Image (cartoon, coloured by chain):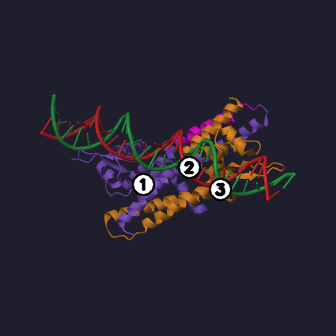
Chain colours: A purple, B orange, C green, D red
DNA sequence: CTAAACTTTCAGTAATTATTGAAAGTTTGT
DNA sequence: ACAAACTTTCAATAATTACTGAAAGTTTAG
C-alpha cells in the first residue's frame, strides 16, 4: 500500500467510525487529516484535501476547537489561520472522554438518580422502576468514573500496571 | 415525581442517549421499556406504550434480539409472542460491549494495523502517518481489551478491586 | 479610512436515517 | 386444508442531520 492510499484509507475509516458513534463524518475526517499532517493546515488546504465546502470546514473546525482537540496556529507572516490537532493520543482520548462525559453521560446520570429516587408507593411496578434505574445509575457512574480515571494522564501508572495485570 | 412521569422520563432520556451514541431511538426506548417492566410485553403493548408502528417495533425488536439483549418469551396458552430484556445490567453491558467491539472496533483496529504497516519510504509524511496510526492502533487495542475484560463477568473481581483502588 | 484577505453565518438543499402501513409471509388450532 | 392470529418485509414517506455557497462579518496592511 502506498502513502496516498494508506492516508485515504485512514481518513475514511476514521470518518465512518465517527459516524457510527454519533460524531459527524467531516469532523472526524478533519481531525484525522490534521492528526497525520506534518504541519499545520489552512482552511483552504483542508477543504481541498477533503473536498468539502468552506462553511462545513469552518463549522467543524469550530466544534473541534470547542472540544479542545484542535487549536489555531498563527504562522508569522501569514494572514490565514492554520490548524493543528492534539498529536498525543492519550491527550486526545482525555479531551474526548472529558467532553462526552460532561455533556452526555453526566446529565443522564443525573436523570437516573432522580428517577430512582421517586417515592416507593409499594406497587410492584414502582419497585421495579426504582430497582432497575438504581442499578443503571450505579453502572453508569462506575463506568464514567473508571473511564475518566483511566484516561487521565496523571494517573497513568494505573493504566499501565492494570494492563500488565489483565492482559 | 409520580411513577408515570418517572417512567416517561427514563424512557425518553435513555432514547436520547442512544441517539447521541449512534443507537436508534426506538430501539433504545423499547429496551428501556422492557427493562423496567415487571412482565414480558407483547408487540401490541410496546406499540401502544411508545406510540410506534408495528413495522418499526418488529424491526427494532429483531435488532435487539440480534444483539442478544432481548429474548422472545413464549407464554403458554398465548398465541402472541412476548419479549423480555436482560435485566442484569452487568450482562447487558457485556452484550453491548461485545457486539460493538466485534462489529465496530475490531474492524477499525484492523485498518489501523494495515495502515501503520505500510513501507517506510523515508519521507517525513510517511513517517508521520506510520507513527500516528501506530499510536492510535495501540490505544484502540488497549481500550478495546480493557473494556472487554472489565465488562466480562468472569473477571469481575478485577473490576471490584480496581474500583476500590482508584475511587 | 479603505480595500483586500480572510472567516463566519445561515437559509436553502441534499443526503441520510428512521418510520409507517399495508401486503406478503408464517404459524397454529380445528 | 383452511382461516384466523399473528409477524415480517419493504417501498413510500417523513424526520433528522449534514453540507453548500454566497452574503455578511472581521481583521489587517497600507
* Residue B160 located left or right of residue A146: right
Q: Is residue C11 placed above or below B148 in the rendered structure?
A: above
Mark 2–mark 1 distance (CA, rounded to whole Å): 18 Å
* Helix, strand or loop status at disc 1: loop
Part of the protein shown in magenta: A102-120
Mark 1–mark 3 distance (CA, rounded to whole Å): 37 Å
- For disc 1, the marked residue is A88
Q: Main secondary structure of the magenta part?
A: helix
Residue B21, position as x, y percentages in the image? 54, 47
Residue at x-position 74% and y-position 45%: B42
Residue D22, position as x, y percentages in the image? 29, 39
User: Share a chain, discs 1 and 3?
Assistant: no
Numbered-mark total: 3
* Helix, strand or loop status at disc 3: helix
2 or 1: tag closer to the N-terminus: 1
Residue A147: give its label. Answer: 2
Given contact means CB atoms under 8 Å apart, are the residues at marks 1 and 3 in contact?
no
- Magenta-colored stretch includes residue A119: yes
Name the subunit of mark 2. A
* Helix, strand or loop status at disc 2: helix
Residue at x-position 54% and y-position 51%: A150
Residue A114, position as x, y percentages in the image? 65, 34
- Magenta-colored stretch includes residue B13: no
- For disc 3, the marked residue is B66
Residue B140: give its label. Answer: none
Given contact means CB atoms under 8 Å apart, are the residues at marks 2 and 1 in contact?
no
Of C7 and B135, nearer the camera is C7
Amino acid at each position: 500500500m502506498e502513502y496516498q492510499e494508506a492516508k485515504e484509507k485512514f481518513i475514511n475509516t476514521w470518518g465512518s467510525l465517527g459516524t457510527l458513534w454519533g460524531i459527524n463524518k467531516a469532523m472526524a475526517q478533519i481531525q484525522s487529516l490534521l492528526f497525520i499532517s506534518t504541519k499545520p493546515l489552512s482552511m483552504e488546504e483542508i477543504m481541498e484535501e477533503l473536498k468539502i465546502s468552506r462553511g462545513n470546514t469552518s463549522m467543524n473546525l469550530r466544534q473541534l476547537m470547542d472540544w479542545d482537540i484542535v487549536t489555531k496556529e498563527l504562522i508569522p507572516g501569514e494572514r490565514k489561520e492554520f490548524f493543528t490537532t492534539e498529536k498525543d493520543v492519550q491527550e486526545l482520548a482525555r479531551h474526548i472522554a472529558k467532553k462526552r462525559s460532561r455533556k452526555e453521560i453526566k446529565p443522564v446520570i443525573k436523570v437516573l438518580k432522580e428517577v430512582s429516587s421517586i417515592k416507593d408507593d409499594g406497587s410492584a411496578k414502582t419497585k421495579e422502576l426504582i430497582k432497575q434505574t438504581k442499578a443503571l445509575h450505579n453502572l453508569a457512574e462506575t463506568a464514567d468514573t473508571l473511564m475518566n480515571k483511566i484516561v487521565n494522564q496523571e494517573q497513568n501508572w494505573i493504566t499501565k500496571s492494570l494492563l500488565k495485570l489483565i492482559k
